[in-house]
Amino acid sequence: MNDNLATEILDKLKNGELHEFRIQKEDFMIFRKVLVAREDFKHYRGIAKHNGEVVYQYMQEARS
């Protein structure tokens, strides 16, 4: 995982090309760094799973 790949994944989630994306524990910090730098950060929902995995989805309405 690198910054460019994380940006590409987040854009695909936003554009509806991906419904969700699963991030492995070892890639989480890189992915999160790119995610929180985005203006639409609050549109993404991360759902924690077992073994440090997180499933991200894009929501049309921003969370509060």
Image (cartoon, rainbow, N blue to C red):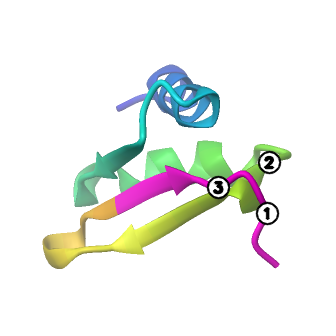
How crowded pointer 1 is (Cα within 10 Å; few <14, some 14-19, many 20+) is rated as: few
Going from the N terminus, do you reach mark 2 or mark 1 first?
Answer: 2
Would you place residue 3 above or below residue 48 in this image? Answer: above
As shown in the figure, which amino acid type bears the numbered disc 1?
Ala
Q: Do the residues labelled 2 and 3 touch (CB within 8 Å)?
A: no
Residue designated by label 2: 40
Pointers 3 and 1 in contact (CB under 8 A)?
yes
Kindly report the distance in space between the C-alpha atoms of the residues bearing marks 2 and 1: 8 Å
Above or below residue 28? Residue 15 is: above
Residue located 42% across and 41% down the image: 19
In the image, which residues are magenta?
55-64
Q: How far apart are marks 2 and 3 (CA)?
A: 10 Å
The residue sitting at 31% across, 51% down in the picture is 23
**Residue 64 figure quarter:** bottom right
Whether residue 62 appears in magenta in the rendering, the answer is yes
As drawn, 10 above or below 57: above
**Mark linked to residue 62:** 1
**Residue contact between numbered discs 2 and 1, judged by CB atoms under 8 Å:** yes
Lateral position of residue 5 relative to residue 41, left or right: left
Q: Is residue 39 above or below residue 3?
A: below
Which element carries disc 1, helix, strand or loop? loop
**Disc 3 crowd, CA 10 A, few/some/many (<14, 14-19, 20+):** some
Counting the numbered discs, the total is 3
Tell me the SS state at disc 3.
loop
- Which amino acid type is marked by label 2? Asp
Residue 15 position within the rendered picture, expressed as x and y whole percent measured from the top left: 62, 27
Which residue corresponds to mark 3? 59
